[in-house]
Image (tube, helix red, strand yellow):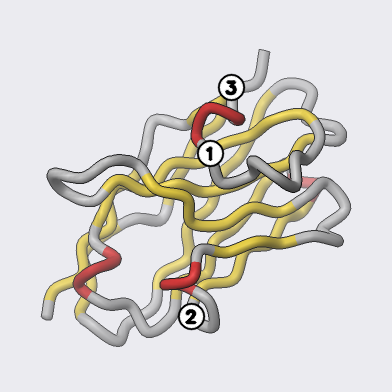
Amino acid sequence: QVQLVESGGGLVQAGDSLRLSCTGSGRTFAYTWGWFRQPPGREREFVAAITWAGSITAYTESVKGRFTISRDNAKNTQYLQMNSLKPDDTAVYYCVARIGYDSANYSSPTQYPYWGQGTQVTVSS
């Protein structure tokens, strides 16, 4: 069983930066990690994913060039560096994990059996 705990959310102004962290407990070798978010009144949406070795990363179009996903396997932790934040980035951000990587379905929430509790990110204009 894998447990994920996020941290680093908060209230910032447009243009600011935040770094989210997610630490996993349990065996996570060969796991793909990722981030989803749920804006107010909307469904959960894919943000980014990274494979075990970090050789493959994927982003949703709206965050490309602003967000960077990374991981430190020695610390069992992944990160989401968020720069140039916009009010539209306001959401609850969830850390996710799954074994292996599905290149066709990596952006589907149903592909990830492990979820963190979520951390709120609020960007004011």
Crowd rating for badge 3 (residues with CA inside 10 Å; few <14, some 14–19, many 20+): few
Q: Residue furthest top?
A: 1
Figure disc tally: 3
Quarter assignment of residue 70:
bottom right
Residue designated by label 1: 108
- In this picture, residue 14 sits left or right of residue 48: left
Q: Which mark is residue 12?
A: none
Type of amino acid at the residue the image marks with label 1: Ser
Work out how far the residue at label 2 is from the one at label 1, CA to CA, in angstroms: 21 Å
The first of marks 2 and 1 along the sequence is 2
Query: What element does badge 2 sit on?
Result: loop
Residue position marked by numbered label 3 in the rendering: 113
Local secondary structure at mark 3: loop
Relative placement, left or right, of 90 versus 109 is left
Residue sitting at the far front:
104
Between 101 and 89, the one lying in front of the other is 101
* Residue at x 54% of width, y 61% of height: 80
Give the residue type that dot 2 points to: Arg
Q: Position of residue 114 (x, y in %)?
A: 57, 25
Closer to us: mark 3 or mark 1? 1
